[in-house]
Image (spheres, coloured by chain):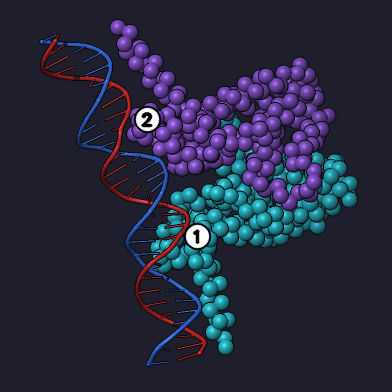
Chain colours: A purple, B cyan, C red, D blue
DNA sequence: CAAACATAATGAATGGTGTTCAGTAAATAA
DNA sequence: TTATTTACTGAACACCATTCATTATGTTTG
């Protein structure tokens, strides 16, 4: 009997439909301003239905975060492909900043906001590791070729990630207003990254 | 007639009383979980009264943020006082990380969370600038003595701030779970800072 | 085919939230 | 003493996340 299979498929599809609607609304209006009722309205179901597929609003966020991590990794794999590991390191950094600048709401969901009750550490452990490993691998290659002044790839990756995340998140939260005006903030962020990579190169 | 003066004083005192209660509860329970009603209960006034002193919950946050910036600057002035600018730079970085680790909720209020409706850019422009200038001055002194490989003090300060903020905020949001376990996260943060300063020193 | 069962969806109800505002009480001025 | 200003109240409004008894639909069994 293929009925239970079909039902299973429909269930998965409906869950994806809910997630897609939620993601769209999170990006357009922000997580906080998107209510379960709004999502229910958008997909033309009652609020209660959403709770048949997601335990609570947090759970919905975790799913969206996982999706976002996949997106980020895909962008890395598309944009940071130079054979030269040092060039690739620059590409990774640029791609990350560009990702944060062009998808501010998505970036927010992934790295900045806090779910009302908890954080799903597993989401970040699992998905986050893949992107982080992409950086570690690149840095390891740089180290093997003696291109960078870094002893530990993990520590070096953490430092570079902290730098770009710091830049992006401070900008997203309008905490860079004390910088001299006139010059475009985006230019400054990229320049700061370039400087950082110049610092670590031999 | 000193009556209006007294009234003015009482008004200021009451506002401070509200802010103190709010700050206490923000730190204990977090901004989101603290309701105007809770604050009103704590100070034994009705919810409506709070709106006589603060336009909305956002405004209350801005006031708390201003207070927090003052605190941060005071810690800098107390803990980062070495005559040697390079040592002072290390002290500033350490102090910042320590501030974020020991006051996670306060750090959250200042640099991570978003007020429901807006961000008061002026708060960060004004208060933030003072702390940021403390860093710029230090870096300028390092540059004058040819101690660091940095061309632009503002850009250099931004980079260093991004690094420490990145470290602290990623940790606060449990985004460092992919790091090898066992080693204390705090140690790693401080080590990462040390590495960074080693990088920029001549 | 009809009855029994399983699944899916509903939507009102609960207990919260920020915010407003007509009404009241107290302090001051006339 | 009366009038006026000021401070405060707390019920009311429109929302929120979440729950759950009820209903509707689809599937299986006798």
Q: In the figure, B73 relative to B147: above or below? A: below
* Quadrant for the C terminus of chain B in the image: top right
Residue B100 in sight in this render: no
Q: Which residue corresponds to the image point at 70% horizontal and 28% vertical from the top-left? A: A95
Which residue, given by chain and number where applicable, does mark 1 sit on? Answer: B22
* Quadrant for the N terminus of chain B in the image: bottom right
Q: In the figure, A30 relative to B46: above or below? A: above
Q: Position of residue A130 (x, y in %)?
A: 59, 24
Q: In the figure, A65 relative to B116: above or below? A: above
Q: Which residue corresponds to the image point at 51% horizontal and 34% vertical from the top-left? A: A25
Left or right of B58 on screen, residue B194: right
Left or right of B25 on screen, residue A81: right
Left or right of B88 on screen, residue D16: left
Which residue, given by chain and number where applicable, does mark 2 sit on? Answer: A45
Specify the farthest residue to the top: A1
Image quadrant assignment for residue B176: top right
Chain of the residue displaying label 1: B
Chain of the residue displaying label 2: A
Foreground mark, 2 or 1, reads 2
Residue B73 got which mark?
none
* Nearest the eye: A64 or A134: A64
């Amino acid at each position: 009997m293929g009925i239970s299979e079909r039902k299973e498929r429909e269930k998965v599809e409906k869950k994806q439909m809910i997630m897609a609607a939620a993601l769209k609304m999170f990006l357009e209006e922000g997580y906080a301003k998107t209510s379960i009722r709004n999502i229910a309205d958008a997909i033309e179901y009652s609020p209660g239905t959403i709770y048949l597929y997601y335990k609570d609003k947090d759970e919905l966020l975790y799913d969206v975060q996982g999706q976002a991590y996949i997106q980020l990794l895909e962008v890395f794999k598309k944009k940071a492909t130079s054979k030269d590991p040092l060039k690739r390191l620059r590409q990774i950094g640029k791609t990350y900043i560009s990702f944060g600048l062009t998808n501010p709401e998505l970036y927010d969901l992934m790295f900045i906001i806090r779910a009302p009750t908890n954080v799903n550490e597993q989401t970040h452990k699992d998905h986050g590791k893949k992107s982080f490993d992409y950086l570690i691998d690149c840095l390891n290659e740089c180290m093997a070729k003696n291109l960078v002044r870094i002893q530990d790839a993990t520590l070096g990756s953490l430092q570079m990630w902290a730098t770009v995340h710091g830049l992006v998140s401070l900008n997203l939260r309008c905490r860079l207003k004390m910088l001299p005006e006139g010059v475009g903030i985006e230019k400054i962020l990229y320049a700061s990254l370039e400087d950082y990579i110049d610092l670590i190169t031999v």
